[in-house]
Image (tube, helix red, strand yellow):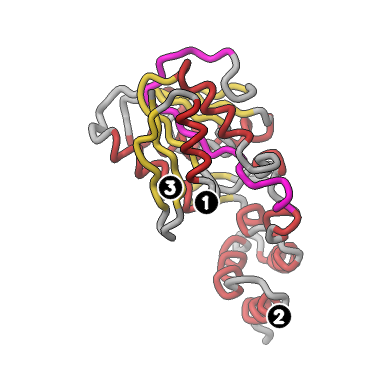
């Protein structure tokens, strides 16, 4: 009898897919309610479609998030933001007012509301698709009574006085997009990746708005090699950069800043 999973792993490896054994197992497990769909899952992965889009979910901060094409896939590096919020706000009972700019799947807002049971939050995104997925994730994780999502362009028409602002903005320089892995370049939403000529367009916009919106601390994810420039942009906007936190790979990843 043919071992379909072993055959899939071999094909994935031959196609140069990273972690073919893990991917094969994830696809196999996700197809068990309908075993006939396994081969179609494998073909999609052979075309470099991300595993998260194929199986329909991604784990983030030990929570499971729905993800669909058109919505940025949560990544482990972004968990650095959650860790930094904890470092800054040790009292988990604090009634924080949290703003998530470019909420995408809602992973940051949802994870923070799970950890801070007295907090309330608002997620902003331009994408209707992202907002639809974020709403499902917020409800799925049981924080819907303390979360609101709204369509918007960054910081327009927002109240002031936020204790915590988090953001994983687009930060890849436009010229670097063609060289990305096909899993990212050909499938994930360009608007969530492309940060303009130097990758810092969104960071500039955020820095300019923080002085008006922020009462407490902002936590902004940045790309490789952007730490010094991001620090200058925050300083030019009249903000203090408390520090820049590295992710688990040692890459400077999150700017922690405030008035």
Left or right side of 62 for 229: right
Q: Are marks 3 and 1 in contact (CB under 8 Å)?
A: no
Q: Is residue 236 magenta?
A: no
Crowd class of label 2 (few under 14; some 14 to 19; many from 20; radius 10 Å): few
Question: In this orientation, which residue lies closer to the viewer: 123 or 114?
Answer: 123
For residue 75, the mark is 1
Element marked by disc 1: loop
Q: Is residue 159 magenta?
A: yes
Element marked by disc 2: helix
Q: Is residue 34 above or below residue 103?
A: below
Front position among marks 3 and 2: 3
Q: Quadrant of residue 4?
A: bottom right
Q: Position of residue 103 (x, y in %)?
A: 55, 33
Image quadrant containing the C terminus: top left
Q: Residue at x 25, y 28 (%)?
A: 93
Q: Position of residue 74 (x, y in %)?
A: 54, 48
Q: Is residue 203 above or below residue 48?
A: above
Element marked by disc 3: helix
Q: Is residue 108 above or below residue 147?
A: below
- The earlier-in-sequence mark between 3 and 2 is 2
Which segment did they paint magenta?
157-177
């Amino acid at each position: 009898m043919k071992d379909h999973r072993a055959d899939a792993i071999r094909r994935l490896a031959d196609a140069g897919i990273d972690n073919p054994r893990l991917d094969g197992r994830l696809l196999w497990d996700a197809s068990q309610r309908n075993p006939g769909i396994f081969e179609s899952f494998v073909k999609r992965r052979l075309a470099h479609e991300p595993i998260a889009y194929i199986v329909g979910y991604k784990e983030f901060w030990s929570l499971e998030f729905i993800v669909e094409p058109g919505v940025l896939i949560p990544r482990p590096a972004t968990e650095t933001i959650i860790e930094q919020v904890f470092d800054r706000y040790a009292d988990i009972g604090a009634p924080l007012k949290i703003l998530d700019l470019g909420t995408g799947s809602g992973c940051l807002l949802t994870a923070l509301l799970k950890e801070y049971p007295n907090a309330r939050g608002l997620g902003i995104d331009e994408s209707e698709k992202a907002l639809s997925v974020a709403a499902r994730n917020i409800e799925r994780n049981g924080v819907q009574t303390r979360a609101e999502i709204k369509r918007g362009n960054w910081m327009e028409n927002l109240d002031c006085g936020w204790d915590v602002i988090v953001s994983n903005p687009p930060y890849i320089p436009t010229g670097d997009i063609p060289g990305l892995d096909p899993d990212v370049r050909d499938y994930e939403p360009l608007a969530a990746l492309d940060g303009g000529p130097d990758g810092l367009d969104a960071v500039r916009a955020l820095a300019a708005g923080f002085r008006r919106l922020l009462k407490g601390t902002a936590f902004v994810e940045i790309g490789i090699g952007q730490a010094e420039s991001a620090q200058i942009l925050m300083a030019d906007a009249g903000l203090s950069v408390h520090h820049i936190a590295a992710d688990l790979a040692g890459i400077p990843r999150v700017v922690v800043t405030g008035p």
